[in-house]
Amino acid sequence: MNNKINKIKLDSMSLEIGETTREIECPSCGAKDGGFVVTRLEEGLVYVCHHASCGYKGFTPSLGFSYQKKRDSLFKSREYPNPLGRIPANMSRVLVQRYSLEPSVVSSERFKWDSHRKRLVMPIFDLEGRECGLVAKDMSGGESTLPKSITYWYNDVIKLHFPLANGELFDKTTVYVVEDILSAVRIAKEGVPSVAMLGSHLREDQIALLAKNFYSAVFAFDPDATHKAIGYANKFHLAFKGGISTVHLPDDPKDMGEDELKGWLNEV
């Protein structure tokens, strides 16, 4: 019995409070088809196998210090490997032409340049404006063999980016949720509160933070992830007092022309 419980604890290590998973193998019957469900509560883990031939279920209390110690050990701080400098003039022109980001906005968001890897390095800020990581975006035009975007985290935080351009916008009731930093900055500089998910996946802890600080949300994912936006809106709709709406975008917000972006924001 202890071996079964220990397996559930180990496989559920990444679950946050209130999160449920169907991706764990049942330690009793070995089912891997999603029939074994584990939910983490503040008090511990609740688990049940929905296969009639099994029915294995139970509760194990909070995992205590050993669990937290293991969770902490999973996070590894990553420092950026190369020296960073100011954005060169030619790249400033690219940011204006491609993303409508003037040098003043780039400076206020504290973007830097990695001349060795030809990467635009963008700080990640939490809700309080504290820097907690970096995203390095490849701007070499396909010369690099590394991933197009690499994320470096300094500490284990709820993984969202709040542009500094938001400023005092957080007294507004609705936040626009987008995928990447450049899109979030583009929207924020138009006077609309925004947050970047740094991808197209949303976790319960991210939703909880947003729902605590905003009355409602607009999910404005990239065009190829609209189905995900709808799915998340259905799943998390009740988390926000004012609900969640989704929009189908013709293009990524960062790639829209200035007039196109303003027109879209006025229509929503």
Image (cartoon, rainbow, N blue to C red):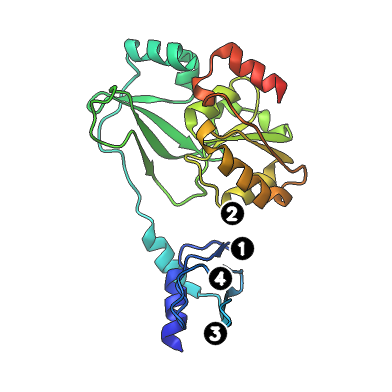
Q: Nearer the viewer, mark 4 or mark 2?
A: 4
| Rendered image quadrant of residue 27 | bottom left
- Residue at 57% across / 24% down in the picture? 250
Does dot 2 land on a helix, a strand or a loop? Answer: helix
How many residues crowd mark 2 within 10 Å: few (<14), some (14–19), many (20+)? some
Rounded to the nearest angstrom, the CA distance separating label 3 from label 4 is 15 Å
Q: Nearer the viewer, mark 1 or mark 4?
A: 4
The residue beneath circle 4 is 37
The residue beneath circle 2 is 204
The amino acid on which the numbered mark 1 sits, given as a three-letter code, is Gly
The residue beneath circle 3 is 53
Between discs 2 and 3, the one toward the N terminus: 3
Label 1–label 3 contact, CB within 8 A: no
Q: Nearer the viewer, mark 1 or mark 3?
A: 3
Residue 232 image point, x, y percent: 61, 47
Rounded to the nearest angstrom, the CA distance separating label 1 from label 3 is 28 Å
Does dot 1 land on a helix, a strand or a loop? Answer: loop
| Quadrant occupied by the C terminus | top right
How many residues crowd mark 4 within 10 Å: few (<14), some (14–19), many (20+)? some
Rounded to the nearest angstrom, the CA distance separating label 2 from label 3 is 32 Å
Locate residue 150 relative to residue 156 in the image: left or right. left
The residue beneath circle 1 is 18
Query: In front: 194, or 251?
Result: 251
Label 2–label 3 contact, CB within 8 A: no
The amino acid on which the numbered mark 3 sits, given as a three-letter code, is Ser
- Give the vertical position of 148 relative to 18 (above or below): above
Residue 170 image point, x, y percent: 67, 33
Between discs 1 and 4, the one toward the N terminus: 1
Rounded to the nearest angstrom, the CA distance separating label 1 from label 4 is 13 Å
